[in-house]
Amino acid sequence: MILPVILSGGSGTRLWPLSRGAFPKQFHPLASERSLFQETLLRLRGLPEAQAPMLICNDKHRFLATEQAQMVDMPLSAILLEPVGRNTAPAAACAALYSLLRHTPDVLLLLLPADHIIADIERFHQVVTQGAQAALQGYLVTFGVVPDRPDSGFGYIQRGPRWQESGYAIHRFVEKPDAVQAQQYVDSGDYYWNSGMFLFRADRYLAELERLAPQMVQCCRQSMDCATQDLEFLRLDTDAFTSCPSDSIDYAVMEKSQHGLVLPLDVGWNDVGSWSALWQIGDHDSQGNVVRGDVIASDSHGCYLRSEHRLLATVGLRDHVVVETADAVVVAPRDRVQDIRHVVSALQAVGRTEPVHHRRVYRPWGSYEVIHAADRFQVKRIVVHVGGALSLQTHHHRAEHWVVVHGTARVTRGQEQFLLTEDQSAYIPIGVIHRLENPGKIPLELIEVQSGSYLGEDDIIRMEDSYGRR
């Protein structure tokens, strides 16, 4: 039996401004009509002996992930919430501990990042099936991507002696090389890109991790023992998990173990690590451009041009990336897009919200978007899913005026409850307990006008919440 474990903890800062802390790259449709996370789930269909996948993510993405899984009709067997990021080794340990409580000791864990692209799914299944045979024998298997070019943006795995027909012993892991070293690695034929995908028995991984990093296993056991159930989510204990050392599976286990194997993987893999990666795999027009959205490219060549909200026009541009969102635009040479992370760091240093939130902010009940903000008032567009409900709440510093433009709203205001339909409105004074719900069969859309001395999102006192938020 194979238990896929989807690791969804990254923030994807190199794909800013589309990827942000509250809505990272794995939840965006970058290479198809579905998000990278959804594509990761869907490629598990047809994998022999695969069970419903387990998901490991952080608290703020939990509803986003479950909603996207439901959209592609993919049930999740468990959802573990990390209170803080501690890299992949502790995440795999918690997955192994959880699986051993519910499955046989030799259950195979297939760890997959949520944000990769794989073109040849049939071949991917074949290689995973080959890896399962080795993993059942107690080997720790990783998948090395057969490089099609020298690339200094990846770590590499050097293979050792051949293991049967399908793989090789691992000689060593190497850090991201410079361009000359990368060329040498590719020319030798002995190196693979490190994919970050792994397959092993849960009990074997825990045994190796306990031998090599006993404190990590101790912290993970404690975080699992003290975990709390919250709706369909299992929250790892904050204190125990925060005290856990942070390390990757590669460093903590694979490069030190004598039981590691690497299987070559030639499946059209891409980790979508930058805008230039999306240019490489995209459909190019006659000028070598990859164009997404409302774009006019005049005398522009070799560019990645993406517009999310308005017309984007370029003239005489060469080998550049231009990405437009509702509240930010990035322009960079294609060979400098890795440095976008420095822009994100600069924004974080001065407390800007753009590294975390888009103008549209997603909530478990729907979304809101600030249309206009000024001194002592702001206007929002709010969309509530069918059956969705905001928390029963109050505010100390602001009043709200709601105008329904689409659908039906059930409003709780103090002791009264009433329905609003299109073109009807309600006023919520400062300090009055209130709630907004969608009892209808279509999404509820309304305009909210807030007024008061303070309009921050932290001026919310929740009395009751359907989604377990505090």
Image (cartoon, grey):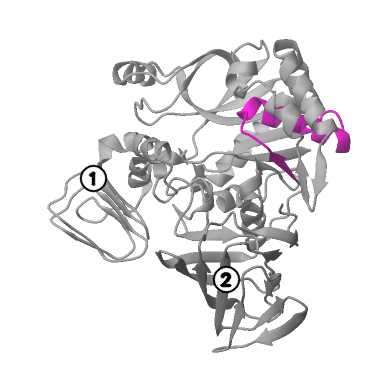
Asked if residue 92 is among those painted magenta in the image, a careful observer would answer: yes
Q: Which mark is residue 399?
A: 2
Q: Can you tell which mark lies on residue 320?
A: 1
Q: Is residue 469 above or below residue 240?
A: below
- In the rendered view, tell whether residue 440 sits above or below residue 248: below
Direction from residue 351 to residue 324 in the image, left or right: left
Dot 2 alpha-carbon crowd within 10 angstroms: few under 14, some 14 to 19, many 20 or more: many
Q: Position of residue 469 (x, y in %)?
A: 71, 54
The x and y percentages for residue 464 are: 77, 62
Sequence order check, earlier mark of 1 and 2: 1
Q: Position of residue 32 (x, y in %)?
A: 46, 56
- Kind of residue at badge 2: Ala
Q: Residue at x 52, y 59 (%)?
A: 454
Query: Mark 1 or mark 2, which is nearer to you?
Result: 2
Q: Quadrant of residue 244?
A: top right
* Residue occupying the point 41% across, 64% down: 375
Magenta span of residues: 79-108
For residue 72, which quarter of the picture?
A: bottom right
Q: Nearer the viewer, residue 301 or 242?
A: 242
Q: Using the rendered image of the protein, determine whether residue 192 is visible from the camera's viewpoint.
A: yes
Asked which quadrant contains residue 218, the reply is: top right
- Quarter of the picture holding the N terminus: top right
Q: What amino acid does circle 1 point to?
A: His
